């Protein structure tokens, strides 16, 4: 196991290097001037050229690549050090638009996004498995048909449309504020502050989770039906194993194996957040911040988010492979 993990980490390092090069080339060679917002249009052309040279705009792509990642790892070491006093520290990577340091701002944005994403993920995985298993065990019943129709309806409704309808219903019809992480213009203290924040998280989280619950429920049901038709399930029933033992000890364990691989996407999703949910519900989170950086061609923000997202994706794949080998004795890490 340890040898496998070390080898995979080495492979991840090579993959991450290739991804960093390709993503940097895509961003660096894309049309547009990312430094235009930093240049003073009132200056003379010669002064603008000197300012452009100082920003490194005319440097070769390889030089830009080395400078960026040297600055990135330097700032990352500062952020990752809990004993480092960052007050007065001169950050090397700063946003071209807001002039804020990239990594500290990204960390603060992620802390805003994290509760929303965690609650959404918890709702999706907590509801999907019981509903999917229950409908698989009661196939072609009125409950199964109702869940199927409801699931297809949630899948068909666009996420942004459903979010807008929910916002309109609560804010316009009922007069209940659900925009932003907390009620704007009102200061709560103690339990009232806790319940206010919980309410503002719960509504967008359930809206964002609705589509995921519908899709994952269908997958769970399909996997359970497929496994319950296998020979070993019929053999267990013929030997007199109880229904609960057949369904939850034999069938469910094997039906859940494909979903272990889906855990690889949890880490980057926690990091990235949901652009649509954050935009409609006015959450100043990470997904919305990165999305806006793409349109303003804020290179340092885009490149940093791409690199960290890629690293978390590779780490999630490694964790899911290890968990799959533990859950399935047929899988051997080699």
Image (cartoon, rainbow, N blue to C red):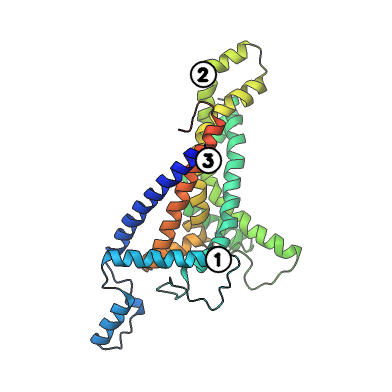
Splitting the image into 4 quarters, where does residue 41 fall?
bottom left
Between 314 and 245, which is closer to the camera in this rendering?
A: 314
Question: Which numbered tag is attached to residue 54?
Answer: none
Splitting the image into 4 quarters, where does residue 97 fall?
bottom left
Task: Identify the secondary structure beneath mark 1.
Answer: helix
Residue matched to label 3 = 214
Question: Residue at position x 31%, y 82% from top?
Answer: 51
Q: From the image, state whether disc 2 or disc 1 is nearer to you.
A: 1
Question: Residue at position x 59%, y 30% from top?
Answer: 133
Residue matched to label 2 = 230
In the image, farthest residue toward the front: 3
Splitting the image into 4 quarters, where does residue 281 fall?
bottom right
Residues packed near mark 1 inside 10 Å, few (<14), some (14 to 19) or many (20 plus): few
Task: Identify the secondary structure beneath mark 2.
Answer: loop
Name the spot of residue 54 as percent of width and height, x first. Answer: 32, 79
Residues packed near mark 3 inside 10 Å, few (<14), some (14 to 19) or many (20 plus): many
For the C terminus, the image quarter is top left
Q: CA distance from mark 1 to mark 3?
A: 32 Å
Between 136 and 75, which is closer to the camera in this rendering?
A: 75
Q: Is residue 77 above or below residue 13?
A: below
């Amino acid at each position: 196991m340890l040898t496998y993990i070390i080898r995979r980490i080495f492979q991840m390092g090579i993959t991450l290097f290739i991804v960093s090069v390709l993503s940097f080339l895509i961003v660096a060679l894309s049309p547009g001037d990312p430094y235009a917002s930093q240049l003073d249009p009132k200056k003379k052309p010669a002064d603008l050229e000197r300012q452009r040279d100082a920003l490194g705009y005319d440097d070769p792509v390889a030089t830009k690549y080395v400078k960026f990642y040297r600055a990135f790892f330097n700032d990352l070491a500062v952020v990752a050090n809990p004993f480092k006093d960052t007050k007065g520290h001169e950050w090397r990577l700063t946003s071209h638009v807001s002039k804020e340091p990239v990594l500290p701002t990204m960390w603060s944005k992620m802390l805003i996004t994290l509760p929303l994403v965690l609650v959404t993920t918890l709702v999706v995985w907590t509801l999907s498995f019981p509903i999917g298993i229950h409908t698989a065990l009661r196939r072609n019943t009125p409950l199964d048909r109702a869940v199927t129709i409801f699931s297809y309806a949630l899948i068909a409704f666009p996420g942004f449309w459903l979010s807008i309808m929910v916002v309109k219903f609560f804010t316009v019809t009922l007069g209940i504020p659900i925009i932003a992480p907390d009620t704007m213009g009102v200061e709560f203290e103690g339990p009232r502050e806790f319940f206010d924040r919980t309410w503002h998280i719960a509504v967008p989280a359930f809206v964002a989770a609705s589509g995921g619950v519908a899709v994952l429920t269908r997958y769970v049901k399909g996997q359970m039906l497929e496994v319950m038709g296998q020979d070993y399930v019929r053999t267990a029933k013929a030997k007199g194993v109880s229904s609960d033992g057949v369904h939850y000890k034999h069938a469910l364990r094997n039906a859940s194996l494909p979903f272990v691989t889906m855990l690889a996407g949890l880490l980057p999703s926690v990091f990235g957040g949901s652009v649509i949910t954050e935009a409609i519900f006015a959450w100043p989170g990470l997904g919305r911040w990165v999305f806006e950086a793409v349109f303003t061609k804020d290179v340092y923000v885009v490149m940093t988010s791409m690199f960290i997202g890629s690293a978390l994706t590779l780490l999630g794949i490694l964790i899911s492979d290890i968990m799959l080998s533990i859950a399935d004795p047929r899988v051997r890490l080699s």
